[in-house]
Image: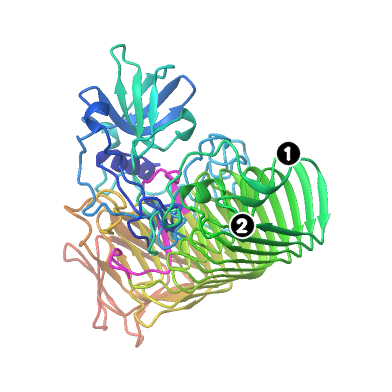
């Protein structure tokens, strides 16, 4: 996809130090910044330790595109060695969120969503669900998720091929370098680590020996962070571990098929799990009580990415849970965490978490989780009620109530493929939803509410955000948000925001309730977010927005480094105006905003509007029913109206 390539260029063009959705500048957070696991959740800083010895004229900086036990292939830009960042790095590199997500990472899960080192296959989650946009079949012929009829294609193939101001992919190159037994690996803090911590999408700096082999490989701290929360990246405030653990500490571990009922599990140790299921075992837990309480646990990336410290962790096995009461009061204390080859089905249960980086139900590394009729409440930062992180996975939720109360903790932080139906989803201190990168969220007959707080790191306020932090936590690609039926309520700011990514929105029959400010219905622009999502002036969005049998109101804001296609169909009505805002567009680009109104739909214009192309088979009037004047940017009058408002376009088709 054109935008995927452009974003990769952007990622390599500058020094990437990002924080996630709504997060602060904590050095390791995976939960609250749209930083990926951070929807707004975690933060990563590029390593500076020993840079004099680890980088020289033989250094190569780039993003890993392929890695084996013996070779590493990186995508680079000319002159992209360490210390030679090209392009314009973000104005402010203090991201806190692991890089990516908005508010909570925006779950503050902000860290990660890229492939987890270790077990998950190269498609980013053992089940192939992250290898293609939500509505695009994966290579194995299966679809990663179902999409509504008539929903726009997630691959946006219909969009023009220009990059709207993004760097030209022609400047990109790849280089494959041999790894040897003498190669030394360093994490982002300059500490020696292992090959297993590297994965596709990770930014690294490689120094070469005299034979051209890799002498050192150093992970760059390039998290962009989540949008809405106060903690960076995807990790919890505080913690810094990022390598996959070789083993877990657990009070109770099941490695064989087991059935348990009326049992109480308790955990008080530091960074331990109350229950761990592994070794491919099949476990049934019925009528259980689980309590995990610890005052000295770390949280951070190890919890967000791998489940360290979760109440119940499944790494390899199938677990069925019914009528459970799960309570955690420890940093990194997710209620239920499915990782890697874990497959969890949980029903009619209550989950409550108190501290940071403690999602209610959580997947990462390709895990699978199915939930029915749960009552989930989270209270910490970077603690989305429904949360995912590095490596993604699959989540299916039916019924129940999911409430997050912490800052940077969306109701849903999505770095996976998630489907939710018939559920109440409420974020009292964050945006409602944060999606980063090549992931999808499908909502059917849900009531969704968000209340993002004011945050000086954000350049606007939103309720649903689709973005890319370039932290490496989430694979670059189309972010897909689909909502059919139900309601969406914004308690602060605008409704939908997309930046620095390719994205698809689909709305059908949703009851939209706007905040008092109602800053915008849709904002599709570059950003000046302090967490640094992409290169300033080249971090626009490439968006398809479809309203199907939908009534909606508010401004649609766009800029020339973005590409926007809006479609009103099947008796849809939109009251609003198109506003071109170049404040985050740098020197501008070749982007556009196009609107198509089918014969059954209506645009009620409430202000002068500027867009690129207008195709109208339906009705355009102002709020008093007057005809609106349509003029070309060259002065041509296509429609002479009686309204006070004018629509200025480059091309017109009636």
- Name the spot of residue 339 as percent of width and height, x first: 60, 45
What kind of element bears circle 2? Answer: loop
**Residue 268 got which mark?**
2
Apparent side of residue 498 relative to residue 268 in the rendered image (left or right): left
Quadrant housing the N terminus: top left
Which quadrant of the view contains residue 492?
A: bottom left
Magenta includes 466?
yes
Q: Nearer the viewer, residue 91 or 97?
A: 97
Neighbor class of circle 2 (other Cα within 10 Å; few <14, some 14-19, many 20+) is many
Q: Nearer the viewer, residue 303 or 401?
A: 303
Q: Which residues are magenta?
A: 455-479
**Residue 222 got which mark?**
none
Q: Residue at x 35, y 39 (%)?
A: 188
Magenta includes 559?
no
The overriding secondary structure of the stretch rendered in magenta is loop
- Name the spot of residue 609 as percent of width and height, x first: 26, 71
Which quadrant of the view contains residue 320?
A: bottom right
Does residue 80 appear anywhere in the picture? no
Quadrant housing the C terminus: bottom left
- Name the spot of residue 519 as percent of width and height, x first: 33, 75
Does residue 412 appear anywhere in the picture? yes
- Mark earlier in primary sequence (1, 2): 2
Residue occupied by mark 1:
280
Which quadrant of the view contains residue 447?
A: bottom right
Please give the count of numbered marks on the rendered protein.
2
């Amino acid at each position: 996809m054109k935008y995927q390539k452009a974003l990769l260029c952007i990622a390599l063009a500058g020094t990437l130090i990002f924080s996630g959705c709504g997060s602060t500048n904590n050095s390791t957070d995976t939960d609250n910044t749209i930083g990926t696991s951070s929807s707004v959740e975690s933060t990563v800083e590029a390593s500076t330790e020993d840079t004099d010895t680890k980088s020289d004229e033989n250094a190569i900086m780039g993003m890993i595109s392929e890695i084996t036990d013996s070779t590493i292939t990186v995508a680079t830009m000319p002159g992209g060695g360490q210390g030679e960042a090209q392009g314009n790095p973000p104005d402010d590199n203090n991201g806190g969120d692991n890089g990516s997500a908005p508010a909570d990472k925006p779950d503050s899960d902000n860290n990660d969503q890229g492939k987890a080192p270790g077990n998950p296959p190269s498609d980013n989650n053992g089940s192939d669900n992250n290898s293609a946009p939500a509505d695009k079949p994966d290579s194995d012929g299966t679809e990663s998720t179902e999409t509504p009829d008539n929903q726009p294609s997630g691959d946006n193939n219909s969009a023009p091929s220009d990059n709207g101001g993004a760097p030209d992919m022609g400047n990109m190159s790849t280089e494959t370098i041999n790894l040897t037994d003498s190669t030394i690996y360093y994490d982002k803090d300059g500490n020696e680590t292992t090959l297993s911590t590297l994965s596709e999408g990770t930014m690294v700096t490689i120094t070469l020996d005299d034979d051209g082999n890799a002498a050192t490989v150093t992970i760059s701290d390039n998290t962009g962070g989540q949008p809405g929360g106060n903690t960076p990246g995807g990790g919890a405030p505080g913690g810094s571990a990022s390598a996959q653990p070789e083993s877990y500490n657990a009070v109770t571990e099941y490695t064989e098929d087991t059935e348990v009922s009326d049992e109480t599990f308790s955990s008080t140790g530091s960074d331990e799990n109350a229950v761990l299921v592994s070794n491919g075992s099949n476990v049934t837990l019925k009528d259980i009580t689980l309590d995990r309480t610890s005052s000295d646990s770390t949280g951070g990336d190890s919890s967000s990415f791998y489940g360290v410290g979760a109440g119940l962790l499944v790494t390899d096995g199938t677990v069925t849970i019914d009528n459970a009461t799960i309570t955690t009061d420890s940093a990194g204390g997710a209620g239920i965490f499915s990782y890697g080859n874990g497959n969890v089905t949980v029903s009619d249960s209550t989950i409550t978490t108190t501290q940071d980086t403690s999602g209610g139900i959580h997947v990462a590394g390709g895990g699978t989780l199915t939930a029915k009729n749960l009552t989930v409440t989270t209270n910490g930062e970077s603690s989305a009620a429904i949360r995912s992180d590095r490596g993604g996975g699959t989540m299916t939720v039916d019924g129940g109530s999911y409430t997050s109360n912490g800052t940077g903790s969306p109701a849903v932080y999505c770095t996976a493929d998630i489907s939710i139906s018939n559920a109440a989803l409420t974020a009292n201190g964050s945006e409602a939803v944060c999606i980063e990168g090549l992931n999808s969220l499908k909502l059917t007959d849900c009531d969704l509410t968000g209340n993002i707080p004011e945050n000086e790191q954000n350049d606007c306020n939103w309720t649903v955000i689709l973005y890319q932090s370039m932290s490496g936590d989430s694979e670059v690609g189309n972010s897909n948000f689909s909502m059919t039926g139900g309601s969406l309520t914004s308690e602060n700011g605008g409704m939908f925001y997309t930046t620095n990514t390719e994205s698809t929105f689909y709305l059908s029959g949703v009851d939209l309730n706007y905040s008092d400010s109602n800053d915008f219905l849709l904002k599709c622009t570059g950003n000046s977010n302090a967490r640094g999502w992409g290169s300033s002036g080249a971090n626009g969005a490439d968006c398809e927005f479809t309203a199907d049998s939908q009534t909606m109101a508010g401004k649609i804001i766009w800029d020339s480094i973005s590409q926007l296609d809006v479609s009103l169909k099947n008796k849809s009505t939109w009251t609003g105006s198109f506003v071109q805002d170049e404040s985050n567009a740098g020197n501008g680009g070749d982007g556009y905003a196009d609107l198509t109104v089918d014969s059954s739909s209506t645009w009620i214009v409430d202000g002068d509007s500027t867009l690129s192309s207008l195709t109208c088979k339906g009705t355009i009037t102002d709020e008093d029913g007057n005809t609106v004047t349509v003029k070309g940017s060259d002065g041509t009058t296509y429609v002479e109206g009686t309204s006070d408002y004018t629509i200025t376009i480059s091309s017109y088709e009636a």
